[in-house]
């Protein structure tokens, strides 16, 4: 790999038969930051995806950067990973804006966790206690105080908790910035469906990833392969290298206030739902959590439940326009922690998936962890700890459940 200060090549599509240092499979909010970080360090990188960058689950994501309210705060491992993710965001957004010329504003109004009834109010008290034990800055609010902060909240509100440190970002803006930055850094973006990973034999036994074969017969050769394939299975891997990632469906709506922003300023959390304001008068109202395989249909039932719950807390939501109804697939492991790091049993093969509810939060961290690992960069003990928590090889024990056989029609 070239040293970081070596001039990067002019934007160009590399000939497909020219090997790169790294092939990233998947152009979502896991793969694109990996490509960005490697390219910044001087690696030649190619990204392959069957569709446009960020057009899968990244396009559906709400963009909460919320390690406290999106994780179980009494689980120190999730919290450590989530907070490490949040810590990387300000620098990532600034660096990405500089590389791309596309601003990536961070919405810093914080989160209000809300209770609609007595049970939810008691759950908020327990949640606040746990946060206190872990030193997380949260503040309990009377309903009247919460309504002074957000006058659109219903008078029936039973309790609230302010989580001031959470951020939010528009994931589509992040994708747009990445898609602008990557070609300028010499990254080759290729459209194509991966049929299988190509493996070569190592002299002393074992195998090494050497690239990928596309469905149209093209071979993309590389010194290392990073699988940022979301919930989708990948063919061509020995059992030991596979990871147990399944799709967990989330449905949501994008609402729009034609009169502009201002109905709600903070991210609102309630039960299993959330309302995330964008700076332009759009609001993301989500989300279901469904075990339905690769189904991405939006259903009347789900949209009804989301609107009913949202209306209970913010009655003014019903005046908004429905702009989109969407469903995405959260790539989820049995312990709900990501798989970011080297695969077991195959040299030069890396995973960058399994982010469950936190794909956007963990995007910058994912890029750094993979790039540090592939370039052999030294890590602080804290980063080493986070890397160990998300190491894919934790699932390599023979008893671990693995992906089912790859269906004919499910390609990365
Ligand atoms: N992070 C929001 C969701 O997964 O629904």
Image (tube, grey):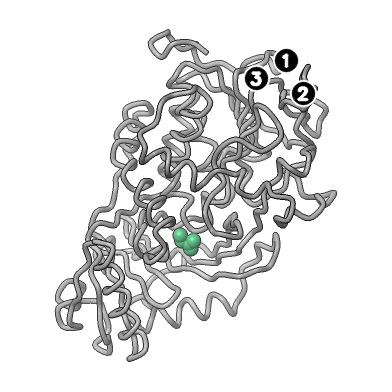
Label 2 and label 1: CA atoms lie apart by 7 Å
The residue under label 1 is: 17
- Neighbor class of circle 2 (other Cα within 10 Å; few <14, some 14-19, many 20+) is many
Q: Which residue is mark 2?
A: 219
Q: Judge whether 97 appears above or below 386 on screen.
A: above
Residue 343 position within the rendered picture, expressed as x and y whole percent measured from the top left = 64, 37
Q: Are marks 2 and 1 in contact (CB under 8 Å)?
A: yes
Residue 9 x %, y %: 49, 11
Q: CA distance from mark 2 to mark 3?
A: 13 Å
Q: Element under label 2?
A: strand
> Closer to the observer: label 3 or label 1?
3
Residue 116 or residue 370, whichever sits in front: 370
Q: Kindly tell me whether residue 351 is visible in this rendering.
A: yes
Q: Is residue 323 visible?
A: no
Residue at 48% across / 33% down in the picture? 179
Disc 1 residue: CB within 8 Å of ligand 1: no
Instruction: Report whether 217 appears left or right of 85.
Output: right
Q: Residue at x 19, y 78 (%)?
A: 147
Find residue 99 and name its label: none
User: Mark 3 highlights which residue?
Assistant: 223
Secondary structure under tag 3 reads strand
Residue sitting at 45 percent across and 74 percent down? 272
- Mark 1 lies on a secondary structure that is loop
Snapshot quadrant of residue 5 = top left
**Place of residue 146 in the rendered image (x, y in percent of width and height, measured from the top left):** 19, 76
**In this rendering, position of residue 59 left or right of residue 264:** right
Mark before the other along the chain sequence, 2 or 1 = 1
Residue 333 at x, y percent in the picture: 60, 56
């Amino acid at each position: 790999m070239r040293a970081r200060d070596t001039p990067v090549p002019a934007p160009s599509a590399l000939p497909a038969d020219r090997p790169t240092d790294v092939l990233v499979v998947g152009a979502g909010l896991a793969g694109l930051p990996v490509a960005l970080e490697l390219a910044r360090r001087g690696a030649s990188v190619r990204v392959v995806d069957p569709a446009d960058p960020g057009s899968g689950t990244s396009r559906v994501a709400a963009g909460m950067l919320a390690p406290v309210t999106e994780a179980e705060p009494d689980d120190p491992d999730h919290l450590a990973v989530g907070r490490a993710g949040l810590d990387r965001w300000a620098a990532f957004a600034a660096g990405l804006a500089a590389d791309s010329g596309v601003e990536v504003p961070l919405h810093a109004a914080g989160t209000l966790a809300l209770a609609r009834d007595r049970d939810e109010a008691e759950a908020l008290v327990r949640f606040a206690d746990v946060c206190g034990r872990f030193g997380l800055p949260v503040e309990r609010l009377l309903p009247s105080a919460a309504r002074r902060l957000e006058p659109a909240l219903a008078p029936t509100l039973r309790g609230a908790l302010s989580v001031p440190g959470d951020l939010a970002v528009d994931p589509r803006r992040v994708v747009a910035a990445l898609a602008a930055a990557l070609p300028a850094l010499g990254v080759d973006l290729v459209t194509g469906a991966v049929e299988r990973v190509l493996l070569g034999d190592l002299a002393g036994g074992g195998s090494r990833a050497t690239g990928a074969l596309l469905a149209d017969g093209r071979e993309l050769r590389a010194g290392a392969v990073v699988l940022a394939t979301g919930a989708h299975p990948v063919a061509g891997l020995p059992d030991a290298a596979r990871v147990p990632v399944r799709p967990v469906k989330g449905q949501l709506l994008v609402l729009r206030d034609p009169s502009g922003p201002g109905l709600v300023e903070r991210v609102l959390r309630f039960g299993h739902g959330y309302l995330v304001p964008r700076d332009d008068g759009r609001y993301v109202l989500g989300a279901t959590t469904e075990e339905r395989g690769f189904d991405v249909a939006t259903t009347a039932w789900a949209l009804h439940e989301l609107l009913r719950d949202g209306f209970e807390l913010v009655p003014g939501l019903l005046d908004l326009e429905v702009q989109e109804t969407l469903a995405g697939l959260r790539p989820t492991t049995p312990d709900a922690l990501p798989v970011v790091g080297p695969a077991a049993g195959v040299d030069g093969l890396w995973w960058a998936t399994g982010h469950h509810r936190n794909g956007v939060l963990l995007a910058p961290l994912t890029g750094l962890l993979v790039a540090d690992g592939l370039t052999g960069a030294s890590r602080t003990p804290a980063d080493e700890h986070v890397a160990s928590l998300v190491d894919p090889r934790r699932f390599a024990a023979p008893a671990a459940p693995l992906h089912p056989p790859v269906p004919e029609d499910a390609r990365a």
